[in-house]
Image (cartoon, coloured by chain):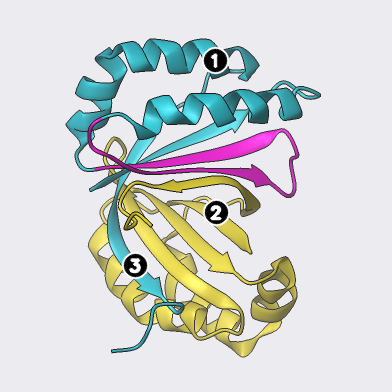
Chain colours: A yellow, B cyan
């Protein structure tokens, strides 16, 4: 499993419009083969900064699959106009994962 | 709930030592009141870049609670020596969360 991490700087003042567009566009991401989870969160300290985290079964599901799909074109068409600058995407793999909220065995 | 996001640049060549130290230090984080989850992931594109994500019940659990605790002093003592530069911590709150792996209703 791989985590796609995208820091998103949204044009100040367009946050509500971006969130509404994301609410449509997220289905293009979530419906793509290998997509496990989609999470968008908004920064407390910098109100026009967002964090997009997408979990994929494999790196190829994102970079070869989604990015070459019609869904990607639709996704970008809906949300990229709100981003300035265009984001730098990085991928991560888990080293440690602890969950205090999981039921004990 | 608030997500603490910390991009960590670890001194190149000390990744294994950092991961071993984190494996001890993570219990200081996870045992702090209000800590829900701890996740450390390593970057695919930049091998000495890590992403630390910690979920807290509230922002105060992190910034007032953990950061003023003896556990924080122990945590920093174990892992901060591997970081260059010292990281910029940001907090985020969820806008959207979708999980394709969750059982359907």
Dot 3 crowding, Cα within 10 Å, few <14, some 14–19, many 20+: few
Q: What element carries label 3?
A: strand
Q: Which mark is residue B66?
A: none
Q: Name the residue under label 1.
A: B78
Chain under numbered label 1: B
Question: What chain letter is assigned to the residue under label 2?
Answer: A
Residue depth check, mark 3 versus mark 1: number of the one nearer the observer: 1
Q: Name the residue under label 3.
A: B97
What SS does tag 2 mark? strand
The magenta segment is B33-56
Marks 3/2: CA distance? 14 Å
Q: How crowded is mark 1: few (under 14 residues within 10 Å), some or many (20 or more)?
A: some
Alpha-carbon neighbours of circle 2 within 10 Å: few (<14), some, or many (≥20)?
many
Where residue A20 appears, x then y in whole percent? 27, 73
User: What residue sits right under mark 2 in the picture?
Assistant: A5
* Magenta run includes residue B2: no
Using the rendered view, name the quadrant where residue A17 is placed: bottom left
State whether residue A73 is above or below residue B74. below
The answer to which of marks 3 and 1 sits earlier in the sequence is 1
Identify which residue is drawn at 30% across, 18% down. Answer: B67
Give x and y (percent) for residue A15.
28, 58
Is residue B74 among what the camera can see? yes
User: Residue drawn 31% across and 51% down?
Assistant: A42
Q: Depth check: A37 or A5 in front?
A: A37
Residue B7 shown left or right of residue B93 in the figure: right
């Amino acid at each position: 499993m791989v985590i796609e991490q995208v820091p998103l700087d949204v044009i100040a003042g367009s946050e509500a419009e971006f969130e509404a567009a994301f609410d449509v566009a997220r289905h293009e991401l979530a419906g793509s083969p290998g997509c496990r989870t989609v999470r968008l969160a908004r920064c407390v300290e910098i109100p026009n900064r967002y964090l997009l985290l997408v979990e994929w079964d494999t790196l190829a599901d994102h970079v070869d699959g989604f990015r070459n799909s019609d869904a990607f074109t639709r996704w970008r068409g809906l949300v990229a106009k709100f981003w300035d600058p265009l984001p730098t995407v990085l991928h991560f793999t888990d080293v440690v994962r602890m969950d205090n909220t999981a039921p004990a065995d």
